[in-house]
Structure formats: structure tokens, C-alpha cells
Image (spheres, rainbow, N blue to C red):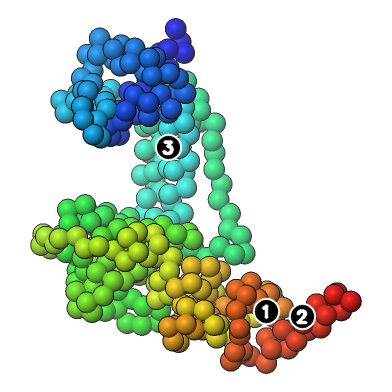
Amino acid sequence: MAATSARTLKLLSIFGIGATLTAQQLATRLGTSVRTVRRDIDTLRELGYEIEAVRGTGGGYRLGPDARLPPVVFDEEQAVATAVALQTVPAVLSGIRENAARALATLHQAMPARSRLHAEAFTVSSARNYWEFPAPPIDAETVRAVGSAINRRHLVRVDYTGDGERPVALTLEPHDLVVWAARWYLVAFDLKGSRWRAMRMDRIQAHAPTHTPFDRRDIPHGDPVAFVMTAPDRGDALADWPCRGSATLALPAATVARYAPGGSIVTSVTETTCRLALGAWSWPGIAGLLLTFDADLTDIEPAELRQALHSLRARIVRGLG
């Protein structure tokens, strides 16, 4: 009986996301049979929850428009996800630590005892490694303003500060927010420049809402994540390593931008070549990173980096006998 109740609670939480799912999809998520899913749906209906059956292509089951969930319906996996998210969000959003702590405490009080036990079992401490270069924490109000404009499809006016530059006033069509390599990016169409941009959220200051609607465009590559990962001008900055150098690679900038280490800068030279500036703890470290791209290297700077490549070549020759 306890297992049936837990499964029914999890089914209710799945319906809470608002999606229409087939009986087979629900069975897969619950790890049970289609017959059991249909029986659990009947149980929810007997308890007063409106579960609609949608027929035709794309059909399945969904929560009815007038149905209301209990104040908090979490299974164990959701409880853990919520606890981890609320404990780690202050690392990327500024001015939210106290609110996140209060939200977590409130959720703990509202959760069923079993879910609360799983949520309270997770205390998360974050630490940075040498290859992680997150942006400074972002103003939570900026994220809210930009996220609201994306959701409503309204133009947004911002001041954007490039690397070492003065703020520039821009009017944007905001399409998506992407978190990649511990940094937040806004994928937007710049009306003045008539081009797509991947923009660092920590460098954006949003103005008052415009309430001016726009129609969504087709994002390059058809995917905001792919666009950010392959955009060489996404606002990255050279990290403060003991050794820093650069070289021109016989590869397109989009290819190198996708795989360049954090804290590096990619600049397009031609359609088939680009310049990569990067750093490491030693000159051989930079040389090794450049070699991972398996491409011809030219214009290698500075002399210490060229010497490191010569030394690596000598070691490889000796190693090959």
C-alpha cells in the first residue's frame, strides 16, 4: 500500500509539469506497467483530480485546466533536486542567498516527512578548480527582467559592457538564456547591429520593461545552446594565468570556440583560420593545449611558447626511440 501511495504521489507530481504524456511514457518514468499507470490514474480521479485523456496524434494524459495540486507535491528525486538547486544558486546569482535559504526552510516545513528527510540529507559546498572560470554572480533582478521579457516576447533595452569597454545602449529581441561553462549567456537579436549575439549576463544592465512585442526568429544552428558554444564573440576574457600565449590555428573560429578551454579568447581571422589566446600554469601546458586541436599552428607568440613546443617535439622524438 505504501508503495502504491508513493507511486501515485509521483504520478501526480509528473502531471504537475503540465505536459501531455502517453501511458507508456508515464509507465517508463514510474518503472511500472501501462496497466498499473491506468489504475493509478483512476485512483487520482477518485480522489478528485481532473486527469484528461487526450486523443489523436500527440495524445495521452494531462492534468485538467481546473485541477489544483496540493501546496507541495515532491517525490524523493524532486526533493533532492530542489535542495541542491537552492543551495548552489547563490554562487551564480547575487542578492539571493538569504531568499534561497528562506525558500529552502519553507519547503522543508511544507514537504511530507519522507521527502523532507531526503532534502535535508544534502548539504552542498562548492569549490572552484583551476579550469573553471565562472562569471561574477549575476544580479537576480537582471535575470528576472530579462527572463520576463523572453517569456512575454517583449523587446528589452540594456546597457552592455564588453571586455574593457564602456557600456553601450542596445535594444534587443531576447530569445533564450543559456548556462554554459559556469557562465550565463543571453541569446538575442541585436536590432541596431542586425545580428545575433551571445551576451554575458553578468555584463548586462536591464532598463525598465518596454512592453513592445516582437516575433521570434529562427536561431542560428536551430539551437541556442549550440549557438553559444560556437560563438567566438560571446564575451569571454583571458584568464589570469602565470603564462599566457597565442597562436593561429588552421580551423574555423566556431570549431575552436566550441572546444577552447575556459578563460581563453577565440578571434576569427579567415573563414578557415582563427587565433586562440589562452593561458596555463606553464609554457608546456599551453603548448599541450594547442596540440589537442590537431591543426597547423602559425604566428606562435611569445618566444617562450615557441621554445616549449620545440622542447615537446624533442621529448616526443626521444620517446619514440
Q: The N terminus appears in which quarter of the rendering?
A: top left
Q: Are marks 2 and 1 in contact (CB under 8 Å)?
A: yes
Looking at the rendered structure, the kind of residue marked 2 is Leu
Quarter assignment of residue 127: bottom right
Q: Is residue 297 above or below residue 50?
A: below
> Between residues 309 and 86, which one lies in front from this camera angle?
309
Residue 312's disc number = 2
Q: Earlier in the sequence, mark 3 or mark 1?
A: 3
Count how many numbered circles sit on residues in the image: 3
Q: Mark 3 or mark 1, which is nearer to you?
A: 1
Q: Which residue is mark 1?
A: 287
> Between residues 269 and 69, which one lies in front from this camera angle?
269
Q: Position of residue 307 (x, y in %)?
A: 73, 88
Residue at figure coordinates x 43%, y 49% from the top left: 89
Looking at the rendered structure, the kind of residue marked 1 is Ala
Q: Report, in whole angstroms, how far the alpha carbon at label 3 lies from the one at label 2.
A: 48 Å
Q: Is residue 30 above or below residue 241?
A: above
Q: Earlier in the sequence, mark 2 or mark 1?
A: 1
Q: Position of residue 92 (x, y in %)?
A: 43, 56
Crowd around label 3: few <14 · some 14–19 · many ≥20 (10 Å)? some
Q: Residue furthest left?
A: 212
Looking at the rendered structure, the kind of residue marked 3 is Thr
Residue at figure coordinates x 55%, y 86% from the top left: 248
Residue 82's disc number = 3
Crowd around label 1: few <14 · some 14–19 · many ≥20 (10 Å)? many
Residue at figure coordinates x 59%, y 89% from the top left: 298
